[in-house]
Image (cartoon, grey):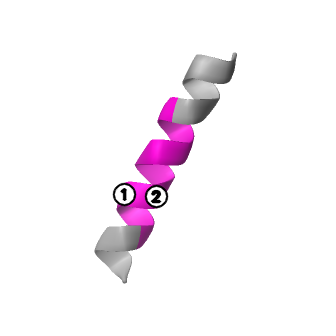
Amino acid sequence: MVQEDQALARKVAAMERRIK
């Protein structure tokens, strides 16, 4: 599902931003 993929990408981006 595209919507789920977008939500996952947003979560990953947020996690990456927190780690960095």
- Furthest residue to the bottom? 20
Identify the residue at image location x=44%, y=69%: 16
In the picture shown, does residue 15 fall above or below 17?
A: above
Q: Which residue is mark 1?
A: 14
Span of residues in magenta: 7-16
Q: Report x, y in % for residue 2.
A: 67, 21
Q: Is residue 11 magenta?
A: yes
Q: Report x, y in % for residue 19.
A: 35, 78
Q: Report x, y in % for residue 9.
A: 55, 45
Mark 1 touches mark 2? (CB < 8 Å): yes
Looking at numbered disc 2 in the image, what kind of residue is underneath it? Answer: Ala
Q: Helix, strand, or loop for circle 2?
A: helix
Q: Which residue is mark 2?
A: 13
Identify the residue at image location x=37%, y=83%: 20
Q: Is residue 12 magenta?
A: yes
* Few, some or many residues within 10 Å of mark 1 (<14, 14–19, 20+): few
